[in-house]
Amino acid sequence: MTRTVFALIAVACLSRSAEAQSRIPRTGDGKPDLSGIWQVMNTAYWDIQDHNAQKGVPAGIGVVDGNELPYTPEALAKKKSNYDKRATLDPETRCYLPGVPRATYLPFPFQIVQSSSQITMLYEYAHTVRNVFMNTPHIEGQLYWWMGDSRGRWEGDTLVVDATDFNDETWFDRAGNFHSDGLHVIERYTLTDADHIAYEATIEDAKVFTRPWKMSMILNRHKEKNFRLLEYECFSF
Amino acid sequence: MSASRSEHVLGLAVAIAAAVIVWSPQLAGQASKNRPMIAGCPSVSAKFHPCALEKAKTFTPPRMPDGTPNLQGIWDAPLAMGFQNIEDFPGDRSPGGFGPAVSVIVDPADGRVPYFPWARAQRDENIKKYIDPYAQCLPTGVPRQMANFRTRQITQSGNLISIVNEAGGHIYRVVYMDGRPHLSPAFKLWMGDSIGHWDGNTLVIETTNLNGRWWYDSEGHFASDALKVTERLTLVDNDTMHYQATMEDPTVYTRPWTIVFPLERIKEKGYEQMEEACHEGDHDAAGFVLGGYQPYPGVRFP
């Protein structure tokens, strides 16, 4: 009897999950349609790790799996120094392009425009643009771009974006968490229903970290009527 | 840090050098001379305008799955010369300066912006006193986005059309096609609020909510934040577009005026727009400031 109940519950859960999957929007070619305006509801912009509130900074549960970042000892010292000088050293305070993955969890919305060959991410922050070219190789040779070189592919219903060719001038957050130009970000975007994307970013950077680490968060669809991106032209103020 | 910084600066220098080579003022100035014809029409705006629209009448554009004309692609505007000057321009006297150039204004017929006299005087003052906001890596506004150096990518997706530029730091517009109203007039945006619809095979975009803090070109031509821009994009053949923009701002101009120039498709297979980080690596503005020029304050109504 108990077993039957569990089995029924299991079936119910499975079918509910299948139902959610079938409810996700899809493009003409059957791929999940990520088009829309998205925004996180977290505090990772200020600190991707667990943190208490400060003046102007809301407290937040971190987005890093396991919370600790596997810095090398030298890198950890630099992170601490960055933290102490964060009010002036955070490149974002100079209105520079926010880098990846920080663009995703800025306290601003961003818009995904999807076609079969390209997924373009338009960020309200400083008109930042990110082009994800589908099923193509990275540009040959090392580039040093603020937003990197992003190449996408579908793994089932998950968009996987492989981003390389970064410079070392962006931070992960206001708390001084940083990377080198050896940064490699692997992102996974999975629609869990029509209005939520499960977002994961795996970070590899052998010059700064002793092993890869991962952050995860939910992207929420803006459903307000006639919602649109406005502008935050950072250095015009 | 320093290695990547220098690499970045080097990359930027290469990009600028490439831009200078491709967009050499002399080449640009002679663009209409070197390319007297485009899509079977004279390339000078005043002549291209009627000829291209006539040709468009007999051209059947490719279609999107929803049946609307397919304008997607990466588009270059070499004959607009990045809007060095939207009016007739004898040429910049400084070494390596731009020009000469022919006006892109097709109405009025004299090819000049129909300013009120005080506004014409203000345009003359602009070039003597102020820095072109674009030279400070600020957004182009509209219509300069469509004429700017290097390329812009048009993507049609669902209820919107995005126009994303490569140059100019990082600029884009999202044109909504779902019949929504414009934003409240309280909003003032560098790139405005763009609402579009189809008129036959022509994409019509009406843009309001512009902030009037940019120039049309490098020569101080300006608008106020009351400006409304109505653009018309029409395919003439598979690889050429007739681009038209009509400006209405009764606070600055005596009447509406219209510019026209061709957009040309980048046909290279697999062409990708790259990143241009303008503000992040910019040192040009410092030169202007040293030269005594000031940031542009916007329109000064008499």
Image: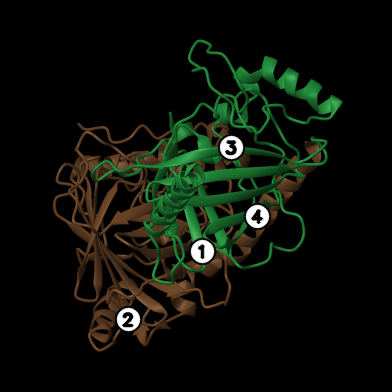
Chain colours: A green, B brown
Q: Distance between the residues labelled 3 and 2?
A: 42 Å
Mark 1 residue crowding within 10 angstroms, few (<14) / some (14–19) / many (20+): some
Mark 2 vs mark 1, foreground winner is: 1
Task: Using the image, tell me which numbered label, if any, was put on residue A187.
Answer: none
Mark 3 residue crowding within 10 angstroms, few (<14) / some (14–19) / many (20+): few
2 and 4 marks on the same chain? no
What residue do we see at 24% from left, 42% from top? B119
Q: List x then y, in percent, for residue A228.
A: 31, 44
Q: Nearer the viewer, residue B79 or A138?
A: A138
Q: Distance between the residues labelled 2 and 4?
A: 38 Å
Mark 1 vs mark 3, foreground winner is: 1
The answer to whether B275 is drawn above or below residue A183 in the figure is below
Q: Helix or strand or loop: what does disc 2 sit on? A: strand
Disc 2 marks which residue? Answer: B236
What residue do we see at 69% from left, 52% from top? A164
Q: List x then y, in percent, for residue B140.
A: 41, 49
Disc 4 marks which residue? Answer: A162
Q: List x then y, in percent, for residue B26.
A: 54, 66
Q: Which amino acid does label 3 sit on?
A: Gly
Q: What residue type is labelled 4?
A: Asp
Could you say which quadrant of the image residue A80 lies in? Answer: top right
Q: What residue type is labelled 2?
A: Val
Disc 1 marks which residue? Answer: A118
Q: Mark 4 lies on which chain?
A: A
Q: How far apart are marks 4 and 1 (CA)?
A: 13 Å
